Image (spheres, helix red, strand yellow):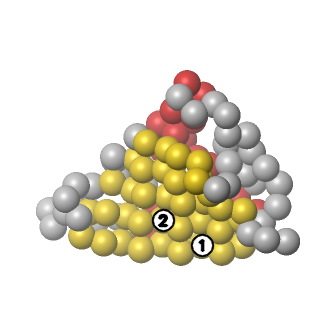
Amino acid sequence: MQAADVNGSLQLRVDALTSQSKRFKSLIGSFFRTEFNRVRPKYGPYEVVIEIERTADSPVHDVDNVAKAILDSLTGVVFHDDSQVERLHVEKVLGDRPRVKVRARPLAQ
């Protein structure tokens, strides 16, 4: 897992693909607590872009289930509640390995 704060936009790469919210919450939560603890949840509207990278032989995942798992895992870490997300883009693409890339950024108010 890798994360970076680029001009107020959190960019996260999870080298795993699952639609199980509990697994993403555990992975992302423990990562931020130990490795990236300078991020604190904020209020205000957010845009979240999720790219689901899969291989030709990866199991099929519904984009809505993966998106919900990601948004749940970012709650309390990036924003206080996933209802703050006003713009959401989710895309499934072929790649080298199963993984999820996420960009969450505050929207101008």
Is label 1 in contact with label 2 (beta carbons under 8 Å)? yes
Q: Position of residue 61 (x, y in %)?
A: 35, 64
How far apart are the two marked residues, 1 and 2, measured between alpha carbons? Answer: 8 Å
| Residue 36: assigned label | none
Q: Is residue 55 left or right of residue 106?
A: left
Tell me the element at label 2: strand
Residue 108 or residue 60, whichever sits in front: 108
Q: Is residue 71 left or right of residue 44?
A: left
Q: Position of residue 84 (x, y in %)?
A: 76, 63
| Quadrant of the rendering where the C terminus is positioned | bottom right
Residue to which mark 2 is pinned: 50
Up/down of 34 relative to 5, above or below: above
Instruction: Name the residue at the front extreme.
Output: 7
| Quadrant of the rendering where the N terminus is positioned | top left
Residue at horizontal 82%, vertical 61%?
44
Q: Position of residue 70 (x, y in %)?
A: 53, 54
Please count the marks in the image.
2
Q: Position of residue 105 (x, y in %)?
A: 65, 61
Query: Label 1 sits on what residue type?
Result: Leu
Q: Is residue 7 visible?
A: yes
